[in-house]
Image: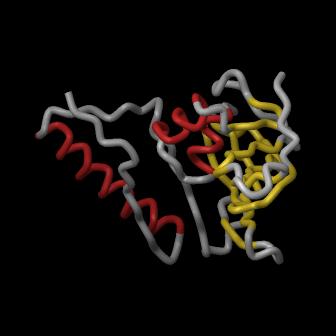
Amino acid sequence: MSYADDTAVISMGKTWKEVEIKMNKYLEDVSIWLKLNKLTLNQFTSTPITESAIDDADDSTYETEDKGSKIMNISVSSLRIDLMLKTGLRMSRNKIETAFYEKRIQKNGFMIIKKSENVIIGDEIDLIANKPMVNPNFLTVSRITIADINFQHDEYKIKIVCEKNLIVENVSKNK
């Protein structure tokens, strides 16, 4: 058995219809390749991500006035913290799992005890990058803030604010 974590299939076009046609062709090619190599795709861990410069406010990524943050609209199958980190920060599940066991994931300032914990609007999810040796009162984190959640067509459409390399006060608490 073989695993290919974090494989990406990318399609670009001037319209969503063009992107859809190209993506369907690419996915058909991937399907044929998988069959020829006797591999399967785990549909439950695969996550589509759309980013757009096409004039469509529902699926877009853009920088805010603060150059360190981006607002993203993502589509996910559940509201799990680990899925938010995987999709929002574009991290592998293995890296998220390692961070979880190293107690480097917080929700609203509290260390999480289950990576399957769900999020709600207003939650701040921090992935602690490191604890500075010089001043242990501050942490460098990558933060995802849940700005909006809508459920449409069997998936959640979520607006998130992503901030990388954010320096925050170390006020972590245990639940």
Residue 89 as seen in the image, left or right of residue 33: right
Position of residue 112 measured from the top left corner of the image (x, y, whole percent) = 73, 28
Where residue 126 appears, as percent x and y from the top left, is: 74, 45
- Count every numbered label the image shows and give the total: 0
Scheme by which the image is coloured: secondary structure
Identify the residue shown where x is 37% and y is 31%.
42
User: Is 75 on the left-hand or right-hand side of 175?
Assistant: left
Which residue lies at the image location 73% right of the left edge and 47% below the top edge? 158
In the rendered image, the vertical position of residue 23 relative to residue 53, given as above or below: above
Q: Nearer the viewer, residue 59 or 67?
A: 67
Image quadrant of residue 26?
A: bottom left
Residue 83 location, quadrant: top right
Q: Position of residue 174 (x, y in %)?
A: 82, 25
Q: Quadrant of the N terminus?
A: top left
> Depth check: 80 or 152 in front?
80
Percent coordinates x, y for residue 50 in the rendering: 56, 58
| Left or right of 40, for residue 15 | right
Instruction: Judge whether 16 appears above or below 147 on screen.
Output: below
For the point 83% across and 77% down, the residue is: 65
Farthest residue, direction front? 134
Location of residue 100 by image quarter? top right
Name the image quarter holding the C terminus: top right
